[in-house]
Amino acid sequence: MEQLTLSVDCGGLGIKASVLDSAGTMRTPAVRISTPYPLSPQRLVETIADLAKTLPQATRATVGVPGMIRHGVVVATPHYINVAGPLTRMDPELKKAWDGFDMRQALTVALSMPTLVLNDAEVHGAGVVAGSGFEIVLTLGTGLGSAIFDGGVLAPHIEFSHAPVRRATTYDSWIGENERRRLGDSFWSRRIRTMVEELRPVFLWDRLYLGGGNARRIKDVVIHRLGNDVVIVPNEAGIIGGVRAWSLIPPAQ
């Protein structure tokens, strides 16, 4: 029987899912729903299970979730701990419910199949990295997602989006969706170029991939100045990476 993978990309504003064959090709167009709020861990599990029922039957699942995910357990997550999503009030009860929640175990039971749960940028990266050299993936969306691959192996996750920049703000706020809307695409694109230029000597990457829903909004004039070591990749990688993610993670994951 062919290995089919249910791949789910959970974002702050939307949740997308499709089923992929062993080559990473979608068996059906991706379905998308708005992320429901307030969002408890169990509600997300139920939402993913309901999405799965609308898609072809799979034999395993890959789910990308924002935040710090270690071995399928949620250490911390943004957005989902807020009463109505990004930039709204944090709910202490939701935060308590999410902290330490074993999402992999819950989904394995709910979906009745082996499930891999990673940070959403890591799944995105699995869909685009070459698998050689030191590769960085930054996803531009509600906030900033990040993943690091060394020789095709996923490195332990860091929440780079929380790093301070420009005094009192973080990268999440500095280049996130709210700031893009305030600045407009042209000024925001220049900010992306500034970020790349400042991070290049920090990471000394072989390749940097810029993905996520807002990568397509980077102006062409800026793209041409980013350098040959920077690649713009489509947002669909957040789903397509669901197959390859199983082979790129270290054994401990």
Image (spheres, helix red, strand yellow):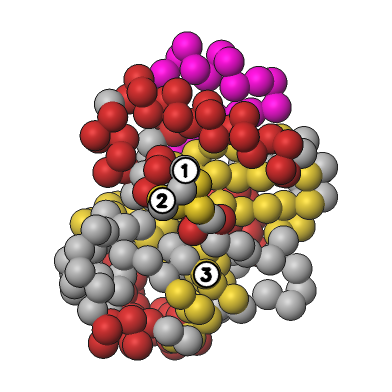
Residue 247 visible to an observer of this rendering: no
Q: How many labels does the image show?
A: 3
Mark 2 sits on what residue?
Answer: 169
Q: Which amino acid does label 3 sit on?
A: Met
| Viewer-side residue, 19 vs 237 | 237
Residue 68 numbered mark, or none: 3
In front of the other: label 2 or label 3? 2
User: Of helix, strand and loop, which one carries label 2?
Assistant: strand
Q: Which residue is drawn at 54% across and 61% down?
A: 159
Crowd band around label 2 with a 10 angstrom C-alpha radius: few (<14), some (14–19), many (20+) = few
Read off the magenta span.
Answer: 219-238
Quarter location, residue 242: bottom right
Circle 2/circle 1 CB separation < 8 Å: yes
Residue 175 visible to an observer of this rendering: yes
Does the magenta run of residues contain 51? no
The image position of residue 118, as x and y in percent, is 55, 67
> Which quadrant holds the C terminus?
bottom right
- Labels 3 and 1: the sequence-earlier one: 3
Residue 166 numbered mark, or none: 1
User: Of helix, strand and loop, which one carries label 1?
Assistant: loop
Circle 2/circle 3 CB separation < 8 Å: no
For this view, does 215 lie left or right of residue 39?
Answer: right
| Viewer-side residue, 92 vs 250 | 92
For this view, does 9 lie left or right of residue 153?
Answer: left
Q: Which amino acid does label 2 sit on?
A: Thr
